[in-house]
């Protein structure tokens, strides 16, 4: 149980990040959120930041964070990108998803290290997409793979803090709506996701947040840099 802790969450305006913020708030935790829009709750410290421009992130964090100790950091912000064949992808799409899914997180971590903020555990919200490619999913897989290696590299070089990559599994968010609109005849890999959504087999953000919060104590026991699928732990 996480109680009376200082927590930073990125991407808390919707989905898993929002569920984590609101659930952790109930346990008298001090929640700091940096997202594309303000999380409107008088008991949450929240600041708006456009992750498409990572250069602004550290300036925003200097306004948001007024402590030298954070117990937990959840690096949750990210986008799916378009699902389409790799030869249709333009350079600007590669650059944009890399900025949001990877470089924005690097800016957050660099701020923490530069400001000498102590952190008990940094949790990167990764994905099974980081482990292997799928037809039509290059943008997401490429960025999540880069993000996984980002966390692992910080774990190797920054021994003062513990870093963990977690895969939470599928979550019923706007990403699923976008996936379900893709033509499965052109991109067959979406067929499975459509079926799971039709059969209500995709967990809600609240359910996934509950599972992640319940696993925090176990996560702290793993070696820094470990990748964990929390559905199987």
Image: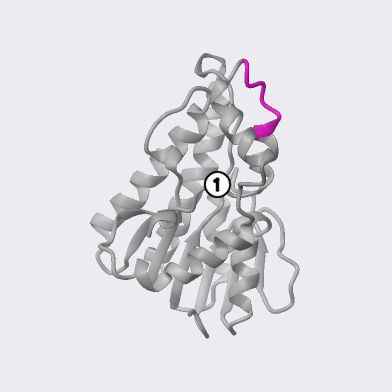
Between 222 and 93, the one nearer to me in the picture: 222
- Picture coordinates of residue 146, whole percent (x, y): 39, 40
- Residue under numbered circle 1: 170
Magenta-colored stretch includes residue 191: no
Relative vertical location of residue 229 with respect to residue 99 in this rendering, above or below: below
- Picture coordinates of residue 84, whole percent (x, y): 58, 21
Relative horizontal placement of residue 144, taking residue 80 as reference (left or right): left
- Picture coordinates of residue 129, whole percent (x, y): 45, 38
Relative vertical location of residue 162 with respect to residue 70 in this rendering, above or below: above
Which region of the structure is painted magenta?
179-185
Q: Main secondary structure of the magenta part?
A: loop
Relative horizontal placement of residue 28, taking residue 68 as reference (left or right): right
Q: Residue at x 53, y 55 (%)?
A: 76
Between 204 and 137, the one nearer to me in the picture: 204
Q: Would you say residue 171 is visible in this rendering?
A: yes
Q: Residue at x 66, y 26 (%)?
A: 182
Relative horizontal placement of residue 168, taking residue 173 as reference (left or right): left
Quadrant for the C terminus in the image:
bottom left
Between 233 and 174, the one nearer to me in the picture: 233
Q: Secondary structure at mark 1?
A: loop
Magenta-colored stretch includes residue 181: yes
Name the quadrant containing residue 62: bottom right
């Amino acid at each position: 149980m996480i109680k009376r802790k200082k927590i930073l969450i990125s991407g808390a305006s919707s989905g898993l990040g929002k569920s984590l913020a609101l659930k952790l708030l109930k346990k008298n935790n001090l929640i700091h959120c940096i997202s594309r829009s303000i999380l409107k709750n008088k008991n949450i410290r929240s600041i708006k930041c456009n992750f498409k421009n990572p250069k602004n992130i550290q300036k925003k964090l200097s306004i948001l964070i007024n402590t030298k100790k954070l117990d937990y950091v959840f690096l949750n912000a990210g986008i799916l990108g378009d699902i389409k064949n790799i030869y249709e992808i333009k350079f600007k799409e590669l650059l944009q998803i890399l900025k949001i899914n990877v470089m924005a997180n690097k800016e957050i971590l660099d701020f923490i290290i530069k400001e000498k903020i102590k952190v008990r555990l940094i949790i990167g919200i990764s994905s099974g997409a980081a482990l292997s490619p799928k037809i039509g999913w290059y943008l997401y897989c490429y960025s999540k793979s880069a993000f996984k290696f980002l966390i692992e590299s910080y774990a190797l070089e920054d021994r003062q803090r513990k870093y963990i990559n977690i895969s939470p599994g599928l979550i019923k968010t706007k990403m699923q709506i976008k996936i379900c609109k893709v033509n499965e005849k052109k991109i067959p890999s979406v067929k499975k996701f459509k079926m799971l959504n039709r059969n209500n087999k995709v967990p809600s953000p609240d359910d996934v947040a509950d599972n992640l919060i319940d696993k925090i104590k176990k996560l702290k026991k793993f070696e820094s840099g470990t990748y964990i699928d929390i559905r199987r732990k």
